[in-house]
Image (cartoon, rainbow, N blue to C red):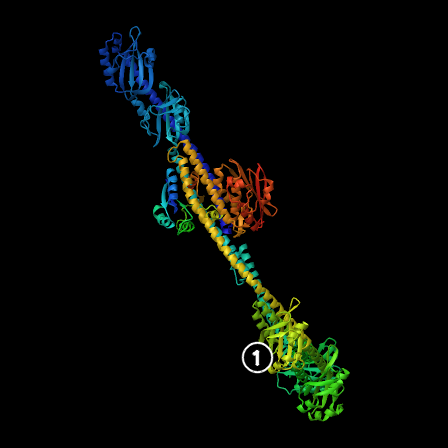
């Protein structure tokens, strides 16, 4: 708990002032309590003493009264037994003393002879204390009930007056009124006090008088001696005397005094409840507490006031310092007192004041610095901008313009200029200038360094030069002239330095008034100057690069053009155009070297007259510029004056050709021609121009090569296309007529031929026309059949190779007129080959003359083979198709027959079985005597009926299996999903339970957990049902089947083991065959289709598993099933 | 005792099953066709249906399908002369019949299996 100073002070006050009060009050209270307790005990003791004395007195008084009666005259008559007189007198006494409620006179034998209660007369008290003890002296008995009244007995001997002889006894029952008066007097006992009379009787203490809190206590209330309560009563009854604070009979704490009254053997207790007795003490305590509270309140108030008085200034100080800590320096504390706290407040004020002053100064400084920094930042930003704009451009003039402008702005001077000095020169040019004032520009002015020593110094020494005031400084005349022209005063000259070189100077100056250049400004200027130097260099480099770039671009462009265009004409034209453009020429042309290596032919031209083109169509190597270039293999340049080929000269002049340049065109290291450009001006084609042209030349060469390759390729691909097309056509169809038509049409189309036909070899000597295209019907009639060796087709068949001819060299005279009539000029015969044999021929013809290359003929041969193979295929197909159709029909018939048979069998078995149901069922009902008791002979007969019905059922079943036999391998349709093998085995066992129970066979399962396989649940269940079914079938009554599944390598290994009849070793290999049962008799005995294991194996196989059987005859069989395990993802 | 509906187009078979089951204390209702079966189900509310497969017009598979569509929890046992594996598979695993009993049946077997189904 955190307390502030006021709270602490208050607590201290309270502790200091309240503690003594509490101690004193408590000791007072204890003393008072003791005193009061003692007083109570004293009062009680006194009361007890008084009451016991009183009671003793009462008892003694009663004894005296009895004694008086016993000595009275009439009692003497006991001896004479004058009972009437005694009675009379006894009644008189009773009347006198009402408390004596029964007075009896006893004779020496203890017999009542006279009594106030006539009922008592005649009773004997001989054995009672009152008689026995009264023989000699007075006897006092305890308080008892007598006729519903409490009373005690006093008996006294009656003695003969003269002799003193014992003649009888007088017994009196006394009502203890006086005693009860004493105990019922509560004087001095407050509200709760009581007096108790008690007597010990055996192990109990009996209460004798009615009590304040219990009016019926007399003789009714008793407590054992060892009771936890009624302690004073017990002490009193035991004869003790004293005082005690203890629990009374009610269990309440009481103050009590107890004493013993010996004369009657009673104990007396006088007590008062401690709660009442201590009322004065409690009052005292209450008073003390009330006083304490009052005292506490006063102390609190005082402590609070004092605390506040003394802590308030401290609190104020504390609050103030908190404010100061938060940054509020306006805090001030008014000193209220002159004590130490007041001083503290004063020094705090002083301290805060100082702090405030310090902060103010600091703020001022910070402000200054911030201003400074902002300014610098702006400057820096400007500088950066300047530098950026300077170094990002390549346009020199623009860069210099920016540089001077920014220098003026940044350094805040009215004038700036830049002078550039070219390398190795002794003069500079004003390259850029900027001023805020309107001035006569000096741009382009030339300054000789020797005339300007200030500039020169900065330039040569590579350092800035400062002229404080131009009016006063010793400037050279030239410098003075410049300065005065503008009224320059303070001048700063910084060199433009780049590495080892100085490129010029930058001048800044004030106009009209002097200015002090600060160190920073000089630095900035130097920085700008350096950037300008770099930018100048960059600009130089850039312009150079740009030149290079332009060249490269051109080359690239030509490259692009020449590689794009594969057609030579186009290519050459594009190359010439480009070359003209690049070299700024007026005209250009290309010659190509012919195969003879001597002739050059003009292939393309631009910018020259048709006349010249015609004239210059052919050149010899060595003639003209092209001829020279081709001859030398090097570029040639010349002016028209030196033109070496006079024949073309006039035409050249006419075309205003003045200058010429020619470069050889090269391809694969060989010269293939020349490119020539001409200009109408006198000019020198530079080295660059020639380089570019040489590049173009080799590009053209490459393109030329490309074009050649391309046309070759194109031809090749066309060929492939034809072959492919024909192949597609012939393989698409097996209809031979269609193949002929399509193949011929395609071939004609591809080879751009006009007519054609296809012949098939009928026998060894004749060809028969199958299809004809592009020729008249009449012609078709003529050539419908030709002998081998006649015409191109016949010749091709004979030679087993294509024949190409024109009408002039046609080999067969007899057909010539018809060919001429049809206008067929070029004729081709192609043999159709299949498996090395000629099967026919294809004729092709064109109405225009046409030359076929060797490649063309190769293609034709290929086409021939294609068609030949297709023909062969088609023929084979035609042959087989007929056979197939026959087979198909037979198969369909068989299939329907089979279906009919299956249906028939299925229906027959149903029809046969239905009556069997009734026969067997009723038979069994009778046999089981469900329809009345039967003699044994009838039962035997019924048993035979049932047995034979079963046999018939099995027979019908077998019949059904035969129909099933028609099935092929069962198609296992699966829906594979992850399966828990345990679930499948459990389901299988459940399904087979009835069968097992019927033979009292126990099926046990021992399967590892979490064995997963991928498979079809129903199918796998079928497998295990089958296996279990078999195991049951082949087990003896009461046998055992054990199914176990374990993980084994990556498989799940399931075994189904029975203790059945077993399988002979020699049949094990055949078990998985369809319809196999180890012994034909087995079927009869055990039933079953013989299909079970076959189906199992099919299913297991479909699961990529394995199934096998181990068995021993007489011992049993184990079927093993191995299925690939499906590993869970977690594993 | 539980009420069982026997569905078979063969009156002799129905009578036989009726006799067998009634001597064991079952109450038996007969239906001689699939159609009759479906009509009577609503009124009779049997505890089990014994269903033949090979019946004219509507065969047992179809009846089974219709019963299961409407009375999902009503147990149906197939009682048929077809004892081929493929039929058993179809009945027990595809159509989810509660049992598959082949005819001719053993009296005790029929009674046992019927009792089992009715009790479960």
Q: Is residue A619 above or below residue A285?
A: below
Instruction: Locate residue A280: give its quadrant.
Output: top left
Q: Residues within 10 Å of mark 1 (few under 14, many from 20)?
A: few
In this rendered view, identify the residue nearer to me: A118 or A188: A118
Q: Is residue A667 above or below residue A951?
A: below
Q: Residue at x 55, y 37 (%)?
A: A1061
Left of A507 or right of it: where is A1116?
Answer: left
Q: Is residue A936 above or below residue B52?
A: above
Which residue lies under the disc numbered 1? A778
Q: Is residue A896 left or right of residue A223?
A: right
**Residue A169: x and y, percent?**
30, 11
Q: Is the residue A241 above or below the residue A548 in the image?
A: above
Labels in figure, total: 1
Left or right of A923 on screen, residue A414: right
Determine the image quadrant of residue A113: top left
x, y percent for residue B26 = 37, 40
> In what element is the residue under mark 1?
helix
Of A853 and A99, the residue lying toward us: A853
Residue A1063, position in %: x, y? 57, 40
Chain containing mark 1: A
Q: Nearer the viewer, residue A891 or A605?
A: A891
Snapshot quadrant of residue A154: top left
Q: Position of residue A198 (x, y in %)?
A: 36, 23
Q: Is residue A353 visible?
A: no
Instruction: Determine if residue B56 is in view.
Output: yes
Residue sitting at the far top: A163
In front here: A946 or B90? A946
Horizontal side of residue A669 vs A1119, given as left or right:
right
């Amino acid at each position: 708990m955190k307390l502030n100073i006021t709270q602490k002070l208050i607590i201290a006050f309270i502790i200091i002032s309240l503690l003594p009060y509490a101690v004193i009050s408590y000791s007072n209270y204890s003393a008072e309590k003791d005193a009061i307790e003692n007083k109570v005990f004293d009062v009680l003791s006194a009361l007890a003493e008084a009451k016991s004395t009183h009671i003793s007195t009462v008892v003694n008084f009663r004894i005296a009264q009895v004694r008086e009666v016993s000595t009275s005259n009439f009692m003497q008559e006991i001896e004479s037994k004058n009972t009437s007189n005694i009675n009379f007198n006894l009644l008189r006494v009773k009347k006198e003393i009402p408390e004596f409620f029964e007075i009896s006179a006893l004779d020496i034998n203890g017999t009542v002879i006279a009594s106030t209660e006539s009922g008592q007369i005649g009773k004997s008290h001989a054995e009672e204390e009152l008689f026995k003890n009264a023989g000699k002296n007075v006897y006092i008995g305890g308080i008892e009930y007598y006729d519903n009244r409490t009373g005690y007995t006093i008996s006294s001997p009656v003695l003969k007056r003269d002799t003193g002889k014992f003649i009888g006894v007088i017994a009196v029952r006394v009502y203890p009124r006086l005693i009860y008066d004493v105990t019922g007097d509560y004087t001095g006992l407050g509200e709760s006090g009581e007096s108790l009379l008690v007597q010990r009787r055996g192990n109990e203490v009996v209460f004798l008088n009615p009590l304040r809190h219990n009016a019926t206590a007399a003789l009714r209330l008793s407590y054992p001696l060892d009771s936890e309560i009624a302690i004073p009563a017990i002490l009193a009854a035991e004869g003790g005397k004293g005082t005690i604070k203890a629990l009374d009979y009610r269990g309440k704490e009481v103050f009590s005094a107890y004493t013993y009254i010996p004369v009657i053997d009673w104990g007396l207790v006088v007590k008062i409840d401690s709660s009442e007795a201590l009322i004065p003490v409690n009052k005292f305590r209450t008073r003390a507490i009330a006083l304490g509270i009052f005292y506490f309140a006063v102390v609190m108030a005082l402590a609070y006031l004092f605390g506040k008085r003394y802590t308030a200034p401290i609190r104020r100080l504390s609050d103030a310092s908190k404010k100061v800590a938060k940054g509020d320096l306006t805090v001030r504390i008014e000193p209220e007192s002159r004590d130490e706290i007041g001083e503290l407040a004063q020094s705090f004020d002083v301290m805060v004041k100082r702090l405030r002053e310090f902060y103010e100064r600091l703020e001022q400084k910070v402000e200054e610095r911030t201003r400074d920094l902002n300014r610098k930042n702006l400057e820096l930003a400007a500088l950066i901008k300047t530098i950026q704009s300077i170094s990002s451009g390549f346009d020199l003039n623009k860069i210099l313009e920016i540089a001077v402008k920014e220098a003026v702005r940044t350094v805040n001077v009215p004038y700036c200029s830049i002078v550039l000095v070219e390398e190795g020169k002794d003069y500079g040019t004003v390259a850029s200038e900027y001023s805020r004032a309107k001035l006569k520009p000096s741009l382009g002015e030339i300054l000789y360094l020797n005339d300007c020593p200030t500039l020169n110094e900065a330039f040569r020494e590579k350092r800035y030069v400062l002229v404080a005031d131009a009016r006063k400084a010793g400037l050279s005349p030239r410098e003075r002239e410049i300065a005065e022209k503008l009224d320059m005063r303070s001048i700063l000259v910084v060199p433009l330095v780049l590495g080892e070189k100085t490129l010029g100077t930058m001048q800044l100056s004030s106009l009209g008034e002097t200015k002090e250049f600060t160190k920073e400004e000089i630095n900035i200027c130097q920085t700008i100057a350096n950037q300008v130097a770099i930018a100048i260099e960059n600009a130089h480099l850039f312009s150079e690069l740009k030149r290079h770039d332009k060249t490269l671009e051109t080359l690239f462009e030509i490259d692009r053009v020449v590689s794009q265009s594969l057609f030579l004409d186009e290519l050459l034209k594009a190359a010439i155009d480009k070359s003209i453009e690049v070299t700024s020429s007026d005209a250009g042309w290309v010659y190509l070297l012919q195969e003879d290596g001597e002739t050059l032919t003009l292939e393309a031209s631009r910018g020259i007259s048709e006349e010249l083109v015609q004239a210059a169509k052919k050149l010899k190597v060595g003639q003209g510029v092209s001829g020279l270039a081709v001859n030398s293999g090097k570029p040639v340049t010349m002016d028209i004056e030196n033109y070496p080929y006079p024949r073309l000269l006039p035409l050249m002049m006419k075309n205003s050709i003045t200058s010429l340049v020619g470069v050889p065109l090269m391809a694969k290291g060989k010269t293939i021609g020349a490119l020539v450009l001409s200009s109408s001006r006198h000019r020198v084609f530079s080295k660059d121009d020639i380089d570019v042209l040489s590049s173009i030349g080799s590009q053209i060469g490459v393109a030329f090569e490309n074009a050649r390759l391309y046309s070759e390729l194109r031809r090749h691909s066309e060929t492939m296309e034809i072959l492919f097309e024909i192949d597609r056509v012939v393989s698409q169809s097996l209809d031979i007529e269609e193949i002929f038509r399509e193949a011929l049409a395609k071939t004609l189309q591809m080879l751009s031929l006009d007519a054609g036909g296809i012949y098939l070899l009928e026998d060894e000597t004749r060809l028969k026309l199958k299809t004809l295209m592009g020729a008249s019907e009449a012609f078709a009639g003529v050539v419908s059949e030709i002998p081998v060796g006649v015409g191109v087709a016949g010749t091709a068949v004979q030679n087993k190779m294509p024949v190409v001819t024109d009408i002039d060299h046609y080999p067969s005279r007899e057909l010539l007129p018809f060919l001429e009539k049809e206008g067929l000029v070029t004729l081709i015969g192609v043999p159709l080959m299949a498996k090395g044999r000629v099967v026919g021929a294809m004729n092709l013809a064109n109405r225009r003359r046409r030359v076929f290359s060797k490649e063309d003929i190769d293609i034709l041969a290929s086409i021939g083979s294609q068609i030949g193979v297709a023909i062969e295929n088609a023929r084979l197909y035609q042959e087989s198709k007929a056979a197939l159709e026959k087979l198909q029909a037979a198969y369909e018939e068989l299939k329907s027959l089979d279906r009919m048979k299956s249906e028939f069998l299925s229906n027959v078995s149903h029809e046969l079985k239905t009556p069997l149901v009734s026969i067997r069922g009723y038979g069994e009902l009778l046999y089981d005597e469900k329809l009345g008791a039967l003699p044994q002979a009838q039962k035997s007969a019924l048993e035979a009926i049932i047995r034979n019905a079963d046999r018939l059922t099995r027979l019908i079943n077998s019949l059904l299996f035969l129909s099933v036999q028609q099935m092929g391998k069962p198609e296992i349709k699966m829906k594979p999903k992850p399966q828990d093998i345990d679930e499948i085995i459990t389901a299988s066992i459940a399904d087979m339970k009835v069968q097992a129970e019927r033979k009292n066979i126990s099926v046990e399962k021992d399967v590892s957990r979490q064995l997963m396989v991928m498979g079809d649940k129903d199918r796998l269940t079928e497998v295990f049902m089958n296996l279990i079914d078999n195991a049951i079938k082949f087990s003896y009554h009461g046998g055992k089947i054990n199914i176990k599944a374990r993980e084994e390598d990556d498989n799940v290994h399931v075994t189904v083991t029975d203790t059945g009849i077993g399988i002979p070793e020699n049949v094990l290999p055949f078990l998985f065959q369809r319809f196999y049962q180890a012994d034909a008799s087995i079927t009869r005995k055990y039933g079953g289709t013989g299909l079970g294991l076959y189906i199992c194996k099919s299913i297991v196989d479909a699961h990529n598993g394995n199934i096998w059987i181990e068995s021993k005859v007489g011992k049993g069989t184990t079927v093993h099933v191995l299925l690939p395990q499906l590993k869970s993802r977690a594993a | 005792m539980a009420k069982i509906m026997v569905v078979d187009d063969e009156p002799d078979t129905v009578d036989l099953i009726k006799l067998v089951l009634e001597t064991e204390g079952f109450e038996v209702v007969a239906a001689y066709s699939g159609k009759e079966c479906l009509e009577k189900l609503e009124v009779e509310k049997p505890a089990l249906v014994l269903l033949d497969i090979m019946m004219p017009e509507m065969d047992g598979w179809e009846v089974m399908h219709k019963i299961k569509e409407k009375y999902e929890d009503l147990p149906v046992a197939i009682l048929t002369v077809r004892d081929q594996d493929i039929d058993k598979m179809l009945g027990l695993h595809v159509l989810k019949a509660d049992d598959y009993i082949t005819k001719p049946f053993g009296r005790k077997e029929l009674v046992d299996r019927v009792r089992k189904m009715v009790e479960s």
